[in-house]
């Protein structure tokens, strides 16, 4: 029986086989095309070189950076005592070069985790308020090293940032009155769950919210400043300083949540040695 089938297959004209194959291919192609039309997928994709519309937030980055270069050049050429604010946001200080990564009126572009667009030794004061905690530990090193580089000998850096110890102390069994008031203030301010015990809730949400990446305690920040080359490292309360230029710098010292901010914030101030030889 198998032999008879083979014989019959051999007798099929080759011309018929080719015609049958071609017809089958045409039918399959037609089906695919009709299916594509029905699904609305027919049509050429845009050429690979066709630019996509950039997101609105990034569309003007080039223009912002160009305007920033002009703003920086104008500031350096007109100011005798040059003061740089990192991560200014909405807190603009008159007479300062206010910078941020987001565009805004009167702001120059500066990414604190990258080389600063400033010459060596061109700045006399650098200050930031609740900025360094938004950087990784390694990027925080960059921020401090760049601050050291662009400061003139004798120049000062001031860093205000949340103090990790203020949150750790909430785990103590017997809370001090300031710590208890602080915990209640944090929960109310940020509308966090008011559940007991609250120490772990406050600590975890503080460390994971608002893009926070690394929160310092005084000892760790002091060590980081020292490794960057700074000396005469001192700790102050917000808005307090032994230098009149830096007194009253912090903007988060007023409003209904001012007491909470003051309790959680530490301020370290340091100096670039007059005979600085470079970072360590």
Image (tube, rainbow, N blue to C red):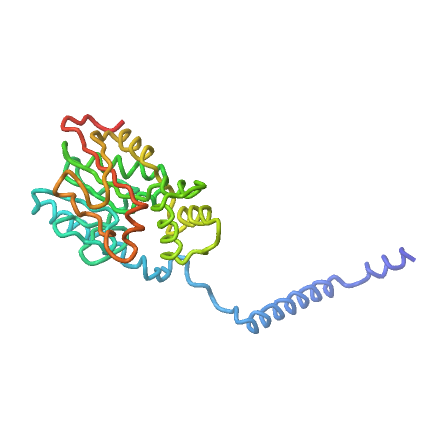
Q: Is residue 215 above or below residue 19?
A: above
Work out which quarter of the rendered image holds the N terminus and state it. Answer: bottom right
Of 78 and 31, nearer the camera is: 78
| Horizontal relation, residue 219 to residue 2: left or right | left
Measuring from the top left, give residue 147's x and y in whole percent: 22, 38
Q: Quadrant of residue 270?
A: top left
Work out which quarter of the rendered image holds the C terminus and state it. Answer: top left
| Horizontal relation, residue 204 to residue 34: left or right | left
Taking the spot 38% from the left edge, 53% from the top edge, the residue there is 184
Q: Residue furthest right?
A: 1
Of 220 and 145, nearer the camera is: 220
Measuring from the top left, give residue 214's x and y in whole percent: 37, 41
Q: Quadrant of residue 192?
A: bottom left
Taking the spot 7% from the left edge, 42% from the top edge, the residue there is 80
Q: How many marks?
A: 0
Taking the spot 9% from the left edge, 42% from the top edge, the residue there is 81
Taking the spot 51% from the left edge, 69% from the top edge, the residue there is 42
Q: Quadrant of residue 267?
A: top left
């Amino acid at each position: 029986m198998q032999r008879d089938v083979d014989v019959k297959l051999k007798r099929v004209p080759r011309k018929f086989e080719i015609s049958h194959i071609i017809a089958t291919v045409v039918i399959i192609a037609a089906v695919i095309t009709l299916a594509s039309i029905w699904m609305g997928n027919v049509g050429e994709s845009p050429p690979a070189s066709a630019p996509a519309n950039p997101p609105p937030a990034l569309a003007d980055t080039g223009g912002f950076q160009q305007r920033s270069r002009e703003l920086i050049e104008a500031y350096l050429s007109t100011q005798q005592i040059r003061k740089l604010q990192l991560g200014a946001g909405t807190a603009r200080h008159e007479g300062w070069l206010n910078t941020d990564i987001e565009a805004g009126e009167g702001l120059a572009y500066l990414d604190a985790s990258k080389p600063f667009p400033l010459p060596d030794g061109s700045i006399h004061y650098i200050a930031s308020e609740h900025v360094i905690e938004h950087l990784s530990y390694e990027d925080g090193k960059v921020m401090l090293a760049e601050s050291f580089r662009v400061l003139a000998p004798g120049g000062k850096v001031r860093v205000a940032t949340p103090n990790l110890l203020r949150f750790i102390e909430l785990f103590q069994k017997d809370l001090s009155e300031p710590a208890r008031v602080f915990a209640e203030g944090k929960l109310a301010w940020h509308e966090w769950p008011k559940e007991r015990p609250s120490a772990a809730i406050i600590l975890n949400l503080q460390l994971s919210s608002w893009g926070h990446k690394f929160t310092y305690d005084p000892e760790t920040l002091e060590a980081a400043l020292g490794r960057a080359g700074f000396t005469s490292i001192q700790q102050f309360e917000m808005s307090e300083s032994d230098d009149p230029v830096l007194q009253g710098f912090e903007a988060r010292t007023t409003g209904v949540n001012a007491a909470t901010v003051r309790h959680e914030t530490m301020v370290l101030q340091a100096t670039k040695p007059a005979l600085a030889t470079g970072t360590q």
